Image (cartoon, grey):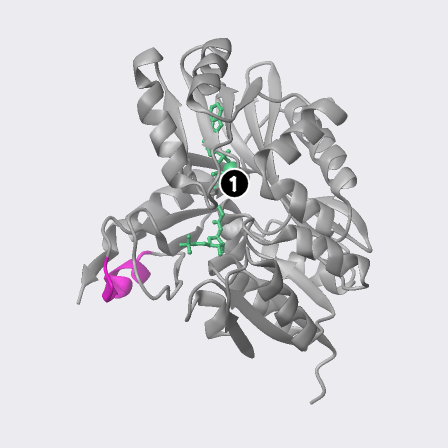
Amino acid sequence: MHLTKKLLMLGSGELGKEVIIEAQRLGVETIAVDRYADAPAMQVAHRSYVIDMLDRAAVREIVEREKPDLIVPEIEAIATAELVKLEEEGFRVIPTARAAQLTMDREGIRRLASEKLGLPTADYRFADDFESFGQAAREMGFPCVVKPLMSSSGKGQSVCKSEDDLDRCWQIAMEGGRVQQTRVIVEQFIRFESEITLLTVRSVSGTAFCAPIGHIQQDGDYIESWQPHEMSEAQLEEAKRIAKAITDELGGAGIFGVELFLAKDRVYFSEVSPRPHDTGLVTLVSQDLSEFALHARAILGYPIPEINVVSPGASRPLKATSELKDYRIDGVEDALAVPKTQVRVFGKPVTKVGRRMAVTLTAAATVEQARVLAKEALDKLSIRGE
Ligand SMILES: Nc1ncnc2c1ncn2[C@@H]1O[C@H](COP(=O)(O)OP(=O)(O)OP(=O)(O)O)[C@@H](O)[C@H]1O
Ligand SMILES: NCC(=O)N[C@@H]1O[C@H](COP(=O)([O-])[O-])[C@@H](O)[C@H]1O
Ligand SMILES: [Mg+2]
């Protein structure tokens, strides 16, 4: 069979793995790239490469060798300046090289959302050294949230509770960033009632929104998500307005995870991923087209006539609590004995503290039921060193 298009994915985690499966289902040749071998998406792609994705020359070399039709970023930490050049030379970057570049660093996307588009966000300051960090924190007031400019899944993030906490938070930020840099963002702490991801897809069929996904985060990383999240019509309209504004500005085709905080009288924009979102793993069981199927369709230029929630659903990630070079996941059989529930094991080669290794997915009659069953299944799973 002659495969129609060639897709090069930069980043090969659990989210990319599902996109590659969906692209292959549509007859696409797939190449997975990441900073380590045997990454989840590499296990299903046609070919793979291990490179330092922050190294411009390394990214260019792979692109020139493979000449893909689509370059699909799967994580933030990529040499996006090189993607900008490659795009200028005629390569297609998803959704656009500018979107990848702006969302890779918190300053780019925050200034765009707040200062250019006027979207409501938490108040914020940037700081380059410990002294200006202290100043910024005092201006934001305590508690405030500190994050490295380039990080994800909560790495390097902390809530700074008081003046005495400044040292600790600065250290966490310096150690947790993806790249060596000292600049941080200090945000006002928002006392939201709930938070959601509004998956927004831009395709030849226009812009479409998935039903809102509610989630709970711990230490900046998600520990539970569900769909649909109950919210007022007015809140949903405001959420869509914000999601439309930011995704229109970023442009291109594909799915975006727009993260929003819901307070009593206000919806705040937090950040946006120009790619599938971890909390959206629930759509593997709750929608007819998962966020991964939607991404694949959108970037390949195929229509998305409609998106349906087929059942309320919930997801629970299994996170490692220690570092293991060789490990196994026990309890899959017991987890699968829980009704209406599925398990996805990602197949990451090693564990690290806090690393997401698998997920339970439940589709049930109500969100409440789905959340209970997904938790029940998660409790059956455990990670054991070999
Ligand atoms: N200003 C804030 N006020 C209150 N809570 C916050 C604030 N900023 C972040 N949080 C909490 O921390 C979580 C993670 O923050 P954020 O999304 O910025 O981190 P991240 O590292 O980009 O995570 P991911 O890559 O998983 O999206 C949020 O979902 C929210 O629960
Ligand atoms: N919040 C972003 C997110 O969930 N990204 C997902 O996690 C992978 C990295 O996991 P790792 O750090 O365990 O290698 C990424 O490749 C992506 O699939
Ligand atoms: Mg986030």
Question: Horizontal and vertical percent for residue 289?
Answer: 63, 58
Whether 38 is drawn above or below 178: the answer is below
Q: Is residue 298 left or right of residue 90?
A: left
Residue 189, position in %: x, y? Answer: 47, 18
Which quadrant of the view contains residue 346? bottom left
Position of the C terminus, as image quadrant, is bottom left
Above or below for 102 versus 97 = above
Which residue range is magenta in the image? 324-338
User: Residue at 43% of width from left, 15% of height from top?
Assistant: 134
Q: Hey, which quadrant is residue 125 in on the image?
A: top right
Residue at image position (50%, 61%) is: 52
Residue at x 48%, y 38% (from the top left corner): 181
Which residue is at 38% across, 47% downward?
316
The residue tagged 1 is 150
Evaluate whether residue 258 shows in this view.
Answer: no
Task: Please name the amino acid that badge 1 sits on.
Answer: Met
Secondary structure beneath label 1: loop
**Image quadrant in which you'd find residue 109:** top right
Question: Does the numbered disc 1 mark a residue whose Cβ is under 8 Å from ligand 1?
Answer: no
**Residue 192 position (above or below residue 323):** above
Q: Tell me where residue 350 appears, x and y as whole percent.
A: 31, 62
Q: Nearer the viewer, residue 130 or 279?
A: 130
The quadrant of the rendering that contains the N terminus is bottom right
